[in-house]
Image (cartoon, rainbow, N blue to C red):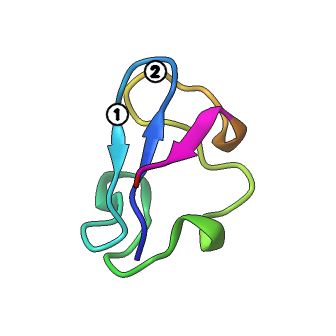
Amino acid sequence: MKKYKCTVCGYIYDPEVGDTENGVAAGTAFEDLPDDWVCPDCGVEKDMFEPLD
């Protein structure tokens, strides 16, 4: 699964790790994140993330 980077603060969303502190289980693809999920570091929405190659 592809990792995504926040273009504002540089946070990397790794689907293998998830975001357990905010209720996102490990193994959750970025595309499957809830619509109201925001960057845990700076609070921006999903549209501010870009895929990492």
Question: For this view, does 36 lie left or right of residue 1?
Answer: right
Numbered mark located on residue 42 in the image: 2
Q: Which residue is mark 1?
A: 11
Q: Nearer the viewer, residue 15 or 34?
A: 15
Where the N terminus falls, by quadrant? bottom left
Q: Are marks 2 and 1 in contact (CB under 8 Å)?
A: yes
Amino acid tagged 1: Tyr
Please, is residue 23 above or below residue 27 in the view? above
Which quadrant would residue 11 be assigned to in this image? top left
Comparing 49 with 34, the one in front is 49
Q: CA distance from mark 2 to mark 1?
A: 8 Å
Classify residue 31 by image quadrant: bottom right
Would residue 10 be counted in the magenta stretch?
no
Residue at image coords 49%, 36%: 39
Q: Is residue 38 above or below residue 30?
A: above
The residue stretch that appears in magenta? 48-52
